[in-house]
Amino acid sequence: MPPAASARRWSASTSPTFPRRTVSPSVAGSQPPVGVFALQGDVREHLAVLTALGADARPVRRPEELEQVAGLVIPGGESSVMDKLSRLFGLRDPLQQRIAAGMPVYGTCAGLIMLAERLQDGIAGQQTLGGLDIVARRNAFGTQSDSFETDLHIPALGDPPVHAVFIRAPVVEAVGDQVAVLARLEGGDIVAVEQGALLATAFHPEIAHEDRFHRRFLEHVAARA
């Protein structure tokens, strides 16, 4: 059973692919461009959310494209593949340098894993970008067929509850002193965290009619523009 009493099994056939706007329109204003890591994962969905919020959102596949953006979303997908491709395309080192320099980054699902300083169960040779002082565990709830959705009350975002979709999702097993825990499941599992300009969720707001995390990410970008 999923770890929350209100949880229900997730199905791609009953969940939207592209989110609709749920709050007031643009928060981006005249901000600099933001990017979505586009070597693997659900890139289009994140681009759609950011564009709906008024951002100049661009796919990022090469170091020169990373140089043009002031913040980055790392989408859900397969973290080990993202790791390999980031090295193959020469993005790993520039990404780590930008993160260390304070670039705002929002990671969902696999993106959370990529931002974790430590993995509890990474595959042989798997590396992360780091930045978030957390220990993450991959595929914490089982296989694709064990995916589920539930509503989360997140005080930092206010009402209504966040509808959260978990697909082969990770959890955060431990956090450092500088990490704020934004959300937990009913059983106590940590599923959303923030540290400075770094934000991460184990779930997928981009496919659940939810844009408040993307809005929060854009606020981090605006604060550093």
Image (tube, rainbow, N blue to C red):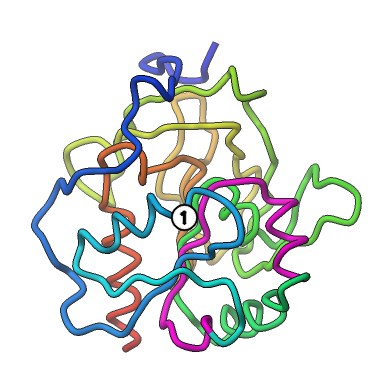
Q: Amino acid at mark 1?
A: Val
Residue at 69 percent of width and 40 percent of height: 138
| Quadrant of residue 101 within the rendered picture | bottom right
Residue at 25 percent of width and 50 percent of height: 157
Which segment did they paint magenta? 65-87
Residue 5 image point, x, y percent: 41, 14
Residue 25 image point, x, y percent: 10, 60
Q: Nearer the viewer, residue 90 or 149?
A: 90
Residue at 67 percent of width and 67 percent of height: 130
Residue at 36 percent of width and 44 percent of height: 205
The verdict on residue 14 being magenta is no
| Quadrant of residue 88 within the rendered picture | bottom right
Is residue 196 visible to the viewer in this orientation of the structure? no
Judged from this view, the residue extending furthest toward the right is 124
Residue 66 image point, x, y percent: 53, 81
Position of the N terminus, as image quadrant, is top right
The verdict on residue 81 being magenta is yes
| Quadrant of residue 32 within the rendered picture | bottom left
Is residue 81 visible to the viewer in this orientation of the structure? yes
Q: Is residue 71 above or below residue 24?
A: below
Judged from this view, the residue extending furthest toward the left is 24
Judged from this view, the residue extending furthest toward the top is 1
In the image, 10: left or right of 29? right
- Which residue is tagged 1? 43
Q: Nearer the viewer, residue 99 or 178?
A: 99
Position of the C terminus, as image quadrant, is bottom left
Mark 1 burial class by Cα count in 10 Å: few <14, some 14-19, many 20+: many
Residue 207 image point, x, y percent: 36, 39
